Image (cartoon, rainbow, N blue to C red):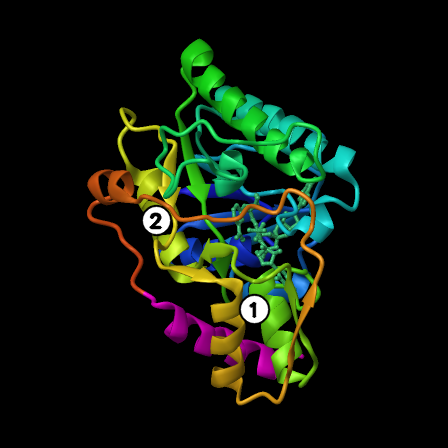
Amino acid sequence: MKRILVTGGAGFIGSHLCERLLNEGNEVICLDNYFTGHKSNIAHLLDNAYFELVRHDVTHPFFIEVDEIYNLACPASPIHYQYNPIKTIKTSVMGAINMLGLAKRVNAKILQASTSEVYGDPAIHPQPESYWGNVNPIGPRSCYDEGKRCAESLFINYYHQNNVRIKIIRIFNTYGPRMNANDGRVVSNFIVQALNNEDITIYGDGKQTRSFQYVDDLIEGMIRMMRTDNSFIGPVNIGNPGEFTMLELAKKIIDLTGSKSNIIHLPLPQDDPMQRQPIIELAKEKLNNWEPRVILNEGLIKTIEYFKNHL
Ligand code: NAD
Ligand code: UDP
């Protein structure tokens, strides 16, 4: 049994990770300040004697004896990370410093939930880990993108300078049950709109693409990454290479829900990336043949079911 800290554990991805780690017989400490996370996401775990919940903000130091740390604390949806951009930068940067300091002190392995956003609006398609990205450092997404890029830099330097055992994964758009209904990301927005027979809001012409990964595939990749030996630190892309336009996604969701919704077009937000698709050869090679198993239709059906019961 390992003792494992999950920061951002009450969020969408964090709650699935806490659940999986507990099911595998570990002791899990879930740390969250509930900015975008909810107790309801982890309420079903509270009866487990090996699960602990801590209300804490990662911008402040935190002391605990643990074997592993998964650092997920950070709002992930553009609406939420742009709400208080300075706080978003502090969460990424000071959160990384505090968690890396903790890992150093107690000799824990630490995994950073980085993002495909480090590639910005990519000039290379699809994206390999070796691509340095195309991020606007003063645009509305920079608080998130540059915060996450700085966190990667902190991780790599704690590795070189202090021998901290680090792992960096770059997560591509992930969806599934327990996404926030009002979180503004495209999959939850379209499903909620479709279930309510409201207009489906496509930003721009809808020809921009994203590659959508079901949450269970991500959790499997994260856990495999944490288990790799010390010679592999990443960064490694974890995503599903299936690439879809937002128009295709909207039509799929209308079909799967049997909705009467119409599609409408709203202005494209500034610096919205035009395309996104991971190259996952490194993950396959290093993570024991890891690859996504859940195709978009199957994952959407499970997510629609969740929202039907939770709206
Ligand atoms: P989420 O918003 O559901 O979860 C983030 C969690 O972090 C929430 O529970 C929130 O309350 C908590 N949090 C935020 N600021 C905090 C702070 N200062 N101190 C403590 N807790 C704080 O988002 P998610 O989709 O579950 O994302 C989890 C992680 O994965 C994030 O780091 C995000 O950047 C990364 N990621 C997610 C995606 C995706 O598609 N979902 C893609 C790339 C990277
Ligand atoms: N998007 C959209 N309608 C919405 C929400 C998002 O067309 O109601 C678009 C958005 O402009 C972007 C894509 O969907 O091109 C993915 O957006 P999301 O916020 O989910 O993720 P990110 O842009 O961070 O990849």
Helix, strand or loop at label 1? It is: helix
Q: Residue at x 42, y 33 (%)?
A: 168
Residue 161 image-quadrant placement: top left
Q: Which is nearer the eye, 15 or 102? A: 15
**Tags 2 and 1 in contact by the CB under 8 Å rule?**
no
Q: Tell whether position 134 is magenta.
A: no
Which amino acid, by three-letter code, is at mark 1?
His
Residue extent of the magenta highlight: 294-311
- Front residue of 33/76: it is 76
Q: Could you tell me which residue is drawn at 71 percent across and 37 percent down?
A: 88
Where residue 185 sits, quadrant-wise, is bottom right
Q: On the picture, is 48 further left or further right than 228?
A: right
| Disc on res. 6 | none
Q: Position of residue 53 (x, y in %)?
A: 63, 51
Residue to which mark 2 is pinned: 221
| Place of residue 193 in the rendered image (x, y in percent of width and height, measured from the top left) | 66, 77
| Dot 2 or dot 1, earlier in sequence | 1
Q: For residue 1, say whether it is visible.
A: no
Marks 2, 1: nearer the viewer: 2
